[in-house]
Image (tube, rainbow, N blue to C red):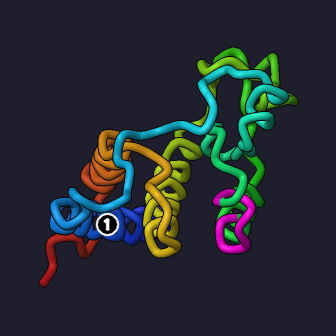
Amino acid sequence: LIVVLSSIVALFAVATAGLFLVYAPLFAGHKYDFSGYVCSPFEASPSEARARGCEFDNFTMQWYPKERYERRETMELHDRFMAMGWPRSLDKAQQHIIEDLERAPMKIYITSKEHIWHCGYSLLQVHLWFTMGFDPPTTYGHTEHCVNTMLDLIERYPPPDLNEV
């Protein structure tokens, strides 16, 4: 089941990346910012970030502009992915579980499963934000990383019908 779901997410990821490559030139003179702008610098204190008008997404572990993050569509997507519960820790043995992600350092330990789900979430988030007229919440490099992560997973664990017509 995970392989099938991963295959579906990967195909969506490839389609999203393909659309991005096709349509990116159209956005060249447009208002979209593809620089990977972050609402608040990494490891900023929560009070500093909120003073800048940012809210923390505890699935991507990024600070986003409040007006984008608090949209119903964004929150529904976030809640679907967070509902699984994800253990985050300061050490690989997961002896030091992180309770307050907003104050956590950038280098933390997550499961490989969460990494893959993070990629699916990020790709959906990019597409969702485009449909709402917002800048993408991440860089093209991150999208490329996520697509490659999912494609690699499919290659390592191909579904039985992968090469069927």
Judging from the image, what secondary structure is the residue with disc 1 in? Answer: helix
At 66% from the left and 73% from the top, the residue drawn is 73
Q: Main secondary structure of the magenta part?
A: helix
The x, y position of residue 62, in whole percent, is 62, 38
Q: Quadrant of the C terminus?
A: bottom left
Stretch of the chain drawn in magenta: 68-74
Front one among 67 and 143:
67
Question: Which residue type carries mark 1?
Answer: Thr
The residue under the point 63% across, 46% down is 64
Q: Residue at 41% across / 66% down in the picture?
A: 9
Name above or below for residue 61 compared with residue 44.
below
Q: Is residue 109 magenta?
A: no
Q: Is residue 93 visible?
A: no
Residue 52 position within the rendered picture, expressed as x and y whole percent measured from the top left: 72, 36
- Quadrant position of residue 71: bottom right
Q: Can you see residue 25?
A: yes
Residue 69 within the magenta-colored segment of the rendering: yes
Q: Which residue is mark 1?
A: 16
